[in-house]
Image (cartoon, helix red, strand yellow):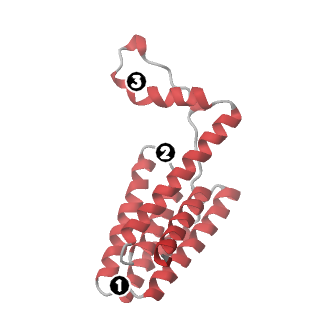
Amino acid sequence: MTPEWATDGSRVVALVIVAIAAFTDARKELIPNWLTLPAIVVAPFFWLFADFPWGGARSLLVLLLCGGVLWLLFRLRACAGGDVKLFAALGGVLGGAYGGLALGFEALFFTLIAASVYSLIRLAWEGKLLRTLANAFYLPLNPVLPKKWRREMSRELMSEVRLGVPALVGTSVAVLLRYQATWM
């Protein structure tokens, strides 16, 4: 069984990491390596000692899975490299506890929801929402449509969202919901 001090401590560390990442991402559009790389390296070892031997294995698994999902998005040019490292770090920090796989994916899920809501609001504010949604509809269909039905994709209608602030929202919601579940 995972020690309670390690579970609670890892949640606090994850919130501190994601808060710093949100601040630096909002100000400089950069999630620094000095923030993410130590967490990626140290978290599995911390969990190895806190909950021998399965804590380290769970931490490493969640680190790879959460980082892997964002890595696939990175390969599709849908997110930046700092976002990949941030979620690998969050997966490692949160993932060692019993139930950490779910918490890591909940943080990722709520982050993507927050980023989606922010994107829709921003596009509506800029008056680009309907054109961008049409672009999104045709993007996967274009390769299979006949040439006369294909639509030219304009780069200015493809939106880019920094994930630092949505990661703070998503991780906070995931952690608070997990604490709420333990209160009831």
Q: Could you tell me which secondary element the residue under label 2 belongs to?
A: loop
Would you say the residues marked 3 and 1 are in contact, meaning their CB atoms lie under 8 Å apart? Answer: no
Indicate which disc residue 143 carries: none
Callout 2 crowding tier (Cα within 10 Å): few <14, some 14–19, many ≥20? some
Instruction: Give residue 94's position: percent from left, percent from top.
Output: 44, 73
The structure residue drawn at horizontal position 64% and vertical position 36%, both measured from the top left corner, is 123
The structure residue drawn at horizontal position 67% and vertical position 63%, both measured from the top left corner, is 23
User: Count of labels shown?
Assistant: 3
Instruction: Give residue 54's position: percent from left, percent from top.
Output: 29, 81
Between disc 2 and disc 1, whose residue precedes? 1
Between disc 3 and disc 1, whose residue precedes? 1
The amino acid beneath tag 2 is Ala
The amino acid beneath tag 1 is Leu
Write down the residue under mark 2.
78
Write down the residue under mark 3.
142
Instruction: Give residue 146's position: percent from left, percent from top.
Output: 35, 14
The structure residue drawn at horizontal position 50% and vertical position 52%, both measured from the top left corner, is 112
Q: Could you tell me which secondary element the residue under label 3 belongs to?
A: helix
Write down the residue under mark 1.
48
Instruction: Give residue 147's position: percent from left, percent from top.
Output: 38, 14
Q: Based on the displayed image, in which of its 4 quarters is residue 35 positioned?
A: bottom right
Q: Nearer the viewer, residue 113 or 58?
A: 113
Residue 4 sits above or below residue 71 on the image: below
Callout 3 crowding tier (Cα within 10 Å): few <14, some 14–19, many ≥20? some
Residue 148 sits above or below residue 156 on the image: above
- Horizontal side of 58 relative to 6 (left or right) equals left
Q: Tell me the CA gap for discs 2 and 1.
A: 33 Å
Q: Tell me the CA gap for discs 3 and 2.
A: 18 Å
The amino acid beneath tag 3 is Asn
